[in-house]
Each structure stands twice: as structure tokens, then as C-alpha cells.
Amino acid sequence: MFANKPRASKAPSRPTLAISGEGDQLALTGTLDISTLAQAGSLLKELPKRGSSRTLDIAKLDSLDTPGALLLCGLRDKGITLICVSPEHRALLDLIYGLELEPLPKVAFVPRWRQIVIQLGKGAHDARHDAVDLVTFVGRAASWTVNALIHPGRLRPASIARHVAETGIHALPIIALMAVMIAIVIGYQGVAQLRPYGGEDFTINLVAVSVLREMAVLITAIMVAGRSGSAYTAEIGVMRTREEVDALEVMGIEPMQVLVVPRVIALVITLPLLTVFADIMGLVGGAAIARFLLHVSPTEYLLRLPQAIDGSDLFVGLFKAPVFAFIIAVVGCMHGLRVRGSAESVGQETTRAVVKSIFLVIVLDAFFSILFERLGL
Amino acid sequence: MKARSDAPERTILSARGIVNRFGKQVVHDKLDLDIVRGEILGIAGGSGSGKSVLLKTLVGLHQPDAGEVLINGKAVRTIGAAERSALIGVLFQQGALFSSLSVAQNIMLPMREHTALPGEVREHIAAMKLALAGLPADSGNKRPSALSGGMVKRAAFARALALDPKILFLDEPTSDLDPIAASGIDTLIRRLNDSLGITVVIVTHDLTTLFTVCGRIAVLVDGNITVDTADRLVRSDHPWIHDFFHGPRADGAIEARKASHGN
């Protein structure tokens, strides 16, 4: 925006400061401002060597600013009298001398081991607090969402549509890419591991089943948590810093209803759809692996797919999608509403929201794996 | 009635033929303004008359569609970073304190960036600036988010003064302040102007500030600017200027001017 010149060539002539005179007639000449302050400090240390004078003539001082005046006031406190002070300098010195100066308070020093103990305690306290908050907020969000579904008049279709477009349609290209890539990764590993046993043809089954049951939904959920969960936190967080959320409350409009519910519903709609899309793209990736590594043509691949997978694989994957969507949306909104005041807080809460939602998605996925195994699905 | 500079060295800042337009709306139409070294100039105008855009143009944050701004004869947007920071100080309307730094660190930031002073000297100077702006020393360790609106203004004032700029731009310095704090800021502006000879440009609606602190007032109307002393502007025939200085809120301010000018 500005022309930033190198600092070295800033001023053709540097301002200077000097002490002239001998004995009891010492005078300060030149410029005493922030640029010569360091020089002034060392010059004045030599002052006792130059003479026994307790006076300093500053009539020839061209310019003086507040840090310079502060230095001169310090001299005055040491018992040196300033003489021949011009009226302008006098006014400035009086202004600075009249201030009640206190040093900045020092930050209390805490030893390292104590800091660690304190942080540990704080961390545990926060974690407990967080868990309670999360459970409460999940409950509130669920109740408001159910409430909105029972009374469809309270739904906000325009808002939901906007969030569906932002979280769903705009995410299609990246989801497609990720799904194909993950199918290729699994395919390569499968071929390498199964070839010694002569079972490399089962790679098709491996890719199809793992994409449908786990990978498509997991990759989509992580992508959406990073893209949309963070956006929810930042949007609501900025509204919080600008007191827009308070304005809603004062107007008797529940923020849960207008900010949280549309986002939750939108994500619960889009994440399953994105998962179906990721399933298809993952199977396309599987077809590519089959063609290039196993020399199975796409038509043959299509014929073999129904033998490899059954309905429960698709169901298991798609069942998890709305649950993950709900968690991602609720965590994102919760952290958005937690923002307090500053821009820094928006950043902190966004980080926490993304980390927490991805963590919860993976924990729930592990839980579902055990559950479906027990149910025999 | 435009300000004419008698000699170039008397004028610290001059804006020539400034044009700013947004779409079809012309905010400034070939506006000229001269700011005299050591004066306190008030910039007044209705909401939407382009006061903030003018301020941003003067400090070089906004590139006008036409015209140029010269500070000490040099185009403002070509002045190097270090030189500019020693020349211009700006108090932004919302304070614009960096929320990740404490108040003292905010004040010390320009010193850290542009001088080679040791840490304890910087802290000593920061403590002095805090006291100068009327803040207690213990507010230095606080984060801006822990300060009240009035204290944010004062802290931002202290930061604007960090490098003792030659021109100080103040955007609404007394809004959000209680009357006692506002008159404290007014006094502070006058004392800095008296003792440091600092040139001050104040964008404000506060009639008391305009009447008691400012030597001249620039009124932005119809895309152009009228600069004169308060006494003469009060007698202007322009309908908007007349209404501005003769509303029900103006009487107290005029009284205050009489009191402060011993008239």
C-alpha cells in the first residue's frame, strides 16, 4: 500500500546531540528526541567527568520531544538544574514533570514447575467444564431443532438453503478428489498385501467395503469439519464481537433458533448427500485401481461389485453421516457463541471447534464400529 | 473561503484537488485543504459527508481518485515507513488497539519497530505516555479487551503519541466518553499543542471540542470544504452550516467558547 523504502536511506542528515563547554558552564546543543535518546543517555553518563557543574544550559537545544523531556526531568530529580530554558521547552518540561509517573507493574514471575502444575490443573478444570457445556449445548440444540421440526413455520428456509449451498455444493470438487485419492491409497496397499497369497482380486472387495463403510463418511466429515464447522464458529463469533447476538436476544429472538438450528439442519441435510457422492467417487477410484493394477475392465468391475458389497455396507456408512453432521454443526455453533470480545478469541475458538469436532467424529466412529460389529451388521 | 498558505513552510500538509467517488456518488469534488504548522484544525460535517474518507486520504491510507496530499512538500504515499511513523500519529475511532498485545506493548510497538532503544527505556517512555494520556500505570499490563470504552480511547491516544508525531489525526476523540473524560481529552490536546507545537487534526461532531479547542474549523458540505474560524462560521449564510452551529445543542458550546477564550 505504501512505498516501503529501506530503512537505511531514511534521512539524509541524522539529528545530532552534543555537550559543549567546560567546568560549570555545560550546555546541551542539537536535537534531543527519540532518535538521539540512546546517544543522550551515554553523553549524560559522562557528565560528572566533564565538570562539577550542577547546572545544564539548554538554550541551544533545537528540538525536544516528550522522551527527551522525560530524560531531562530525570536529571532534575538527580539535582541538576536546567538553565536558560526557552518558553516552549519550559511548557513541555512542566507538562512531563507534572505527571505522576509510576513504573509499569512487573508481571509476577512463576517458576516453570509451578506453571506446569497450574496448567495441568487448569486443563483438567477446563476439560470437565467443556464436557458439561458440550452435553448441555447438544441437548439444547437437539431440543430447539426438534421444536423447529414440529412447528415448521419457525424454520428459516432461506437461511437453510444458503447454508446447504455453502457447506454442500461448494464442497463437491474437493470431496470428489479426496474420495478418489483415498480409494487409490487403499487399493495400492491391498494389492501389495494380498498379492503374495494370490488374492489380489479381493482388492476390489476391500476398496468397495472400506470406502462404503468407513472411508467415504470419515473423509467427508473431516473435510466438512475443517471447511464448514470452522466457518460456523467464525461467523457466529464475529457476530458475537459486534454484539449482534446480544441484539437478537434483546429483540426477543432466540439465537439458538435463528443461528444454530438452520446451520444444524443444513449440515444434517448436506453431509449424507456428500457421503453418497463420496461413495460414488470412491467406487470410481476403485474402478481405476482395478483397471490399472488388476487389469479388470470397468464393465467387469461393475458386475463384480454386487457380489462384493451388500446393503448393510451402504447403510452403515450413511447412518453415521447425520450423526457426524449434528456433532460438527453443534460444536461449531457452540464455540462461535463462546467468543468473547477480541479478534484473538475468534481464532482460538475456531481452532478449538475444529479440533474438537474432528476428535468427536473419530471417537464416535470407533464407537459405531464396535456397535455394528456387535449387532452383526 | 479557502485557507491560503502565506508561505510554503508554514503549511505542514496540503491537499490539492482531492476527488473521491464511490460508484456514481461523488464524496469529495476537487477539494483543497491547507493545514498550518502548529494549528488545531477541526473537521466537521454531517454523517456520510466523507469525513472518515478525507482522514484516510490525508494520512495516505486511501488513494484518492484524483488529486494529491503533500506533507512537508512530499507526497504522503511515497514517504517511507520509518519517516511516516515519526511524522503521523492516528487515533482511530474504535481505538484499533492490537488485541493480542497488552496496552503497554501496544505503545511500545512503534518504538520497538523504529528505534533501537533498550527495553527499560521503552518501558519508562511507555509509562510516561500512559500518564500523559491520563491512564494509571497498572492499566499497562491489561489487554485492550479488559478496558472500558473511555480507557481504550486514552490508550489509543497514548499509542498515537508513541513516536511524538508532528501531526496527530484524531477520529472522534471524545465520542464514547463521559463529559469529564471528554474535557480531559480536550485539555490534553491543547497542552500537547502548546508544549510540543504538535499539529492536530480532529474529526468530530462534538461542538464543545470544535469551539473550545480548534483554532479553525473545516466544514465538509456538498463535496467541498469551507475553512474558517468558529466565530465567522457561526455567522455563515450557508443553510447547513447555519443549522449545524445554531441547533439546540450549540448554545452550551458557544458559552464554553466564550468562557475558554475569556470573551
Image (cartoon, coloured by chain):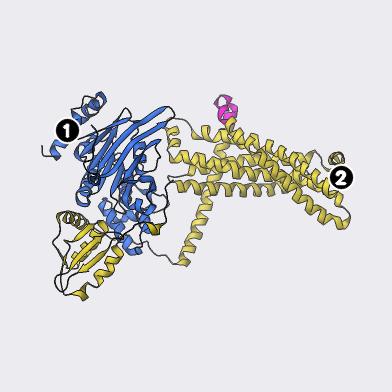
| Category of crowding for the residue at label 1, using alpha-carbon neighbours closer than 10 angstroms: few (below 14), some (14–19), many (at least 20) | few
Overall secondary structure of the magenta stretch?
A: helix
Q: Residue furthest bottom?
A: A49
The residue pinned by badge 2 equals A296
Residue positioned 56% across, 43% down in the render = A230
Colour of chain B as rendered: blue
Residue positioned 28% across, 54% down in the render = B129
Q: Pointer 1 and pointer 2: residues touching (CB < 8 Å)?
A: no
The residue pinned by badge 1 equals B231
Q: Is residue B108 left or right of residue A126?
A: left
Query: Residue B246 at x, y = what percent?
Result: 21, 27
The magenta region covers A146-159
Disc 1 residue type? Answer: Asp
Query: Residue B146 at x, y = what percent?
Result: 37, 49
Magenta stretch holds residue B60: no
Is residue A6 visible in the rendered structure shown here?
yes
Magenta stretch holds residue A149: yes
Query: Residue B213 at x, y = what percent?
Result: 21, 41
Residue positioned 33% across, 30% down in the render = B47
Q: Quadrant for residue B137, please give it.
A: bottom left
Chain letter for the yellow part: A
